[in-house]
Amino acid sequence: MSSFTDEVVSSILRSTGALASVEGDLCHYTNVVQCENTLYALTIDVPSDAQAGSKLVNNSIPIPVLPGQDVVFVSSIIINDPSSKIEDKVEHLLKYNFYLLQNLTINATGVTGTLADNVVPFSFLTTLVVHGKLTGTIPNRYQNLQYLDLYGNQIKTFDAKNFDFLQNVNLSHNIVDSLIVFWGTQGTPKLYTHVDISDNLLTTLPSEVNTPQLEFLNVSRNSIVGTLPKGLFTSTLTTVDASHNQLSGDLPDVSGATALSHFNLSNNGYSTGTEKVLSRSTLSVFDVSNNALSGSIGSIASDVLTTFDVHQNSFTGAVPESLAAQTFLRYLDLSDNAELGGTLVLNGTALPTAETVNVSHTAIQVNITDEYLRTSAVRQLSAVGATVVFTGAAEGAALPGTLPDSLQTLDLTDAGLTGTLPVEWGTNARHLQSVKLTGNNITGCVPRGWTDVAALREAYEELNTTGTFELCPSDDGGGREAKKGLGDGAIAGIAVGAVAALVLLVLLIVLMVYCCKRRKKKKGTAEGIETAATTHVRRTNPLTEGCSTGEGESSCDTSTDISSESEYSVPV
């Protein structure tokens, strides 16, 4: 190793905060330096306690002027900065002559600048990874790359004319609006196997492409118009994601993509062509949600589907019967296709691995058996506005007594249910996180056990926003007729109370009349006695009655005139 090499490597170790000091043989620092013959390989994990504003390297190291003496003998530089301590321009590192460098990986969001083109080419550099804030383009200095990953920068253009060895390209989450000679030409194919240019500013793709080895393509979240060129769909292509663009017309011709597994063209403006894609027997993921697709969904050739998402379209006709037979399907969303009808039968063999089943806002009838409820792995079941029939529910019941242990979310709003609520859910449905039942013909009272389970209590409270639902007196069943308004028991209680009050009122009136008459009678008797005493008894003062006084004489009548004793008798 040259002294200049040691000086640059030591500076990288100190500047990044990997080592506080460096002395002697660099090969002794085995945690960050690997010595391979005459080359160093650096693997640096910037510590969280490193100084903020750390650098990639000392930018002021003098560069030897003699040819060959300026080479830095390093085969690999890997710098990971999870705590974002480094703040530096990448040019400060790349100005040195890393002629023999094979791998440059910098995961540091504080690294800015551009990929310099004014230094000798990287003849051996095959891997370039920079997750920072680089701007500009990718110069020809890096034309021997096989693996290019500039995720999350601000790269704007890329002229790939001289990049003949590129196999894996990740320019996602940049501001790329121009790709020049990127997709190959008639006589010059590109050897890409993986291309990810998602989350950029692309508006078009060429009508002719030549990427015969392409396996993975992601151009999602751009502003691409038109449709995808047929040349992309070669026999090697397994995954295509062109979602969230402005593509329209007929879905692309995938007849040449005999190994196609993942197909995601959701959130575009396509109108027809599902049958061409669904004819692929290798299809695992089919997502054309939120388009303008109409007509019948068509038959499904694949029996290895894991995702089938066609929500937010205008499909008509009957739901394909083969969907229920998909043994690997985990995600099924048919929602928001108002005229999509038919019957989806969920029995003991249907959709055994499905975790999400959504038929909301369709004309589909879903027949759900008890066997399905016992064996299903479903976690989210939604049928808002559809028709749901639980074939094993008890007579007069709207819902079954048992649910899958896996079920967390159940939305049966406006699902055509009629009948009572199951008391069993208060004990065997505690795994539920959300239940919605409004818009149905729920009869009977609400089992008291529902108030002990948060999701069921919320469902009960939501039901009460559309009417008055009474809690059952005890959890012996929810079948008593007490749907809305006052229950029979409450009405009977009010009636008995009213009768009792009326009887008491009558008794009170009778008692008051009796008392008044008795008091009046006593008063009359007393008045009669007083009158009689005044009329028939004349008391005289024997000293004054019948006496006259004259001068010198007096004359007194001392007699008492009392009627016969038989005419007057006053009890004393």
Image (cartoon, grey):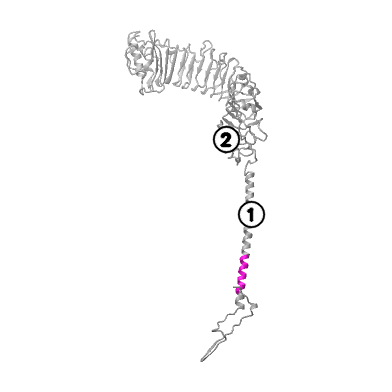
Give the mark nearer the N terminus: 1 vs 2: 2
User: Residue sitting at 61 percent across and 66 percent down?
Assistant: 519
As for residue 61 lying within the magenta part, the answer is no
Q: Where's the N terminus, which quadrant?
A: top left
Quadrant assignment, res 346:
top right
**Residue 146 in the image, given as x and y percentages of width and height:** 47, 12
The image quadrant of residue 394 is: top right
- In depth, the one of 379 and 162 nearer the eye is 379
> Which secondary structure lies at badge 2?
helix
The magenta segment is 518-530
Q: Comparing marks 1 and 2, which lies closer to the viewer? A: 1
Question: In the image, 312: left or right of 106?
Answer: right
Q: Can you identify the residue that label 1 sits on?
A: 502
Residue in view at x 63 percent, y 78 percent: 565
Q: Position of residue 447 (x, y in %)?
A: 60, 37
Q: Amino acid at mark 2?
A: Leu
How far, Cα to Cα, is label 1 from label 2? 42 Å
Front residue of this view, candidates 47 and 204: 47
- Return the residue found at the far right: 395
- Main SS of the magenta segment? helix
**Circle 1: residue type:** Leu
The C terminus - image quarter: bottom right
Residue 54 versus residue 215: which sits nearer the camera? 54
Where residue 177 appears, as percent x and y from the top left, is 48, 21
Specify whether residue 520 is painted magenta: yes
Mark linked to residue 456: 2
Closest to the observer: 109 or 560? 560
Q: Residues within 10 Å of mark 2 (few under 14, many from 20)?
A: many
Toward which corner of the image does residue 313 lie, by quadrant?
top right
Question: Residue 95, labelled with which disc?
Answer: none
Q: Secondary structure at mark 1?
A: helix
Q: What residue is at 49 percent from the left and 19 percent from the top?
A: 197
